[in-house]
Image: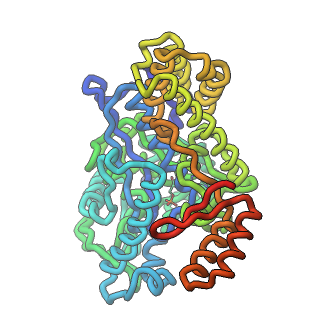
Amino acid sequence: MQIHLSNTLTRSVEPFKAIRETENLVTIYSCGPTVYNYAHIGNMRAFLFPDILQRVLRVVGGYDVRWVMNITDIDDKTIRDSALGSAAWRTEIGEQTSDLKQNLRRFTQFYTEEFVSDIEALLIHRKGFYQMPFATDYIPQMQDLIRRIGAKGFAYERGGSVYFNVGEWRNADKYGKLFNIDFENFQEGVRIDADEYERESVSDFVLWKGQKEGEPAWDLEFEGKTIPGRPGWHIECSAMEYEILGVPFDIHTGGVDLCFPHHEDEIAQSKAGYGVEPVNYWCHNEFLEVEGEKMSKSKGNFFTLRDLIAKGVDPVDVRWLMFSTHYASRMNFTFGGLESGRKARFRVQEYIYDLWERSGGTITPSGDHASAQALRNAIFGELANDLQTPKALAELFTFVNRHPASGTDAAEAASVLGFLKELNEIVEVWQFTPRPAQTLDVPAEVQQLAEARWQAKKSKNFAESDRLRGEIAARGFVVKDTKDGFALEKA
Ligand code: AMP
Ligand code: ZN
């Protein structure tokens, strides 16, 4: 099916055409996490979005995908926190050494492993990744790009750092392709060293930051000088894309906050250094918000995935919640929203169990039956249209309401199951198994009474164990002894 995507570069929804259409191959680069702490679930939206996108490209578009998500293991924040001897060193990582690069690697490795376990819980499978490169493994490529930019006359050294000359670049090409930059306050030759800055401070941005006391450093050879320092954040992505995917490539993703300056600077650097417009489709996800504000570390209004798991949330419901909102719409996070999403998810799961019973466990292609075929066209049509996931789900629930499993015959049930299984290659939140035997819902209080009774019985305090048996019975449960413990049943 023809895929359409909303492209920030053109501010319109465009038919998607791959650069390597004849090979059926799509190349995607996603700005990955900055590994200085645990990612919050707002960040997770920025990783679930490209996961859904790459699955839609595969399952609906029929493409093969190469997907790169970098790990930002060097920037202002990782350097700051790996050097400070933050709480994480004391409690989780261990002793720092005097080797600054080794400290940075151990610190970022720790948070990378935590990140990987989070995305695995959200069912972002790493086997689907082509690569998850560390920025610090590509420093020679970043240095090469800085020299290329310098050779074209768009970079200069000042005070031991190297900057991109925005004023000069604006004579050659547009600066502000993704984001309407207000140049009112722009002053030629004013420089900024921070990785993140506001649009009010448009100025020459840093490509290579001169070494500061206590920071790890690499030597850059630039215009006859050796400049110890480290890469700026923006140059990392430009160099990794070029090295791993080649430019131009098809799709670049990230949260909307990355449009400026990160992505704007990426375009300027890549075009200045490599001479080509690096990306055909820029796709940005909107924010996950809490009470109308972006979820962020600095505002303190964030949950990590492990915070939610500790509150009893199933990570699959986080995946489902993000799927049920369009990626380019702001999304308000509430526990109520998670709960109602969970109910909707189980509604479909129950339907799958019912269909399974009807079909006797047989699953056939959706094309075998007209109603399954029509459902596929409707749902995949919505997904192909710039990932309209809420509309796709509306189609699904309308179908579930209008086609109760009791009204289907075995052939139709098998074919609808065939489609739902295909859809699940994108959504991945349902089980295709017979309905499991009902599990008993035992209140925590009854479970505790039963354990106390078991302890009493083991210590031969039979009066107490009989009394506890009575307490359990009064709550509607029967406790039975088994070979190696006890079992509870409904009275
Ligand atoms: P960082 O680890 O800060 O570099 O961010 C990783 C990704 O998360 C980037 O693509 C950000 O744009 C994205 N991001 C950060 N906060 C949010 C949020 N509240 N909602 C959605 N995406 C976010
Ligand atoms: Zn990036």
- Examine the image and state in which quarter residue 418 appears: top left
In the image, farthest residue toward the top = 370
Q: Residue at x 44, y 20 (%)?
A: 2
> Does residue 223 lie above or below 122 as drawn?
below
Colour pattern? rainbow
Q: Is the N terminus in the top left, top right, bottom left or bottom right quadrant?
A: top left
> Does residue 152 lie above or below 195 as drawn?
above
Closer to us: 475 or 234: 475
> Is residue 331 found left or right of 202 in the rendered image?
right
Closer to us: 267 or 166: 267
Q: Residue at x 26, y 50 (%)?
A: 243
> Is residue 10 found left or right of 97 in the rendered image?
right
Residue 343, image x, y percentages:
66, 42
Q: Residue at x 44, y 62 (%)?
A: 115
Closer to us: 304 or 187: 304
- Examine the image and state in which quarter residue 97 appears: bottom left
Q: Quadrant of ligand 1?
A: bottom right
Residue 175, image x, y percentages:
50, 45
Q: Residue at x 45, y 25 (%)?
A: 360
Q: Is residue 60 in view?
A: yes
- Examine the image and state in which quarter residue 224 appears: bottom left
Residue 354, image x, y percentages:
56, 29
Residue 389, image x, y percentages:
58, 33
Q: Is residue 264 in view?
A: no
- How many numbered marks does the figure carry? 0
Q: Is the C terminus in the top left, top right, bottom left or bottom right quadrant?
A: bottom right
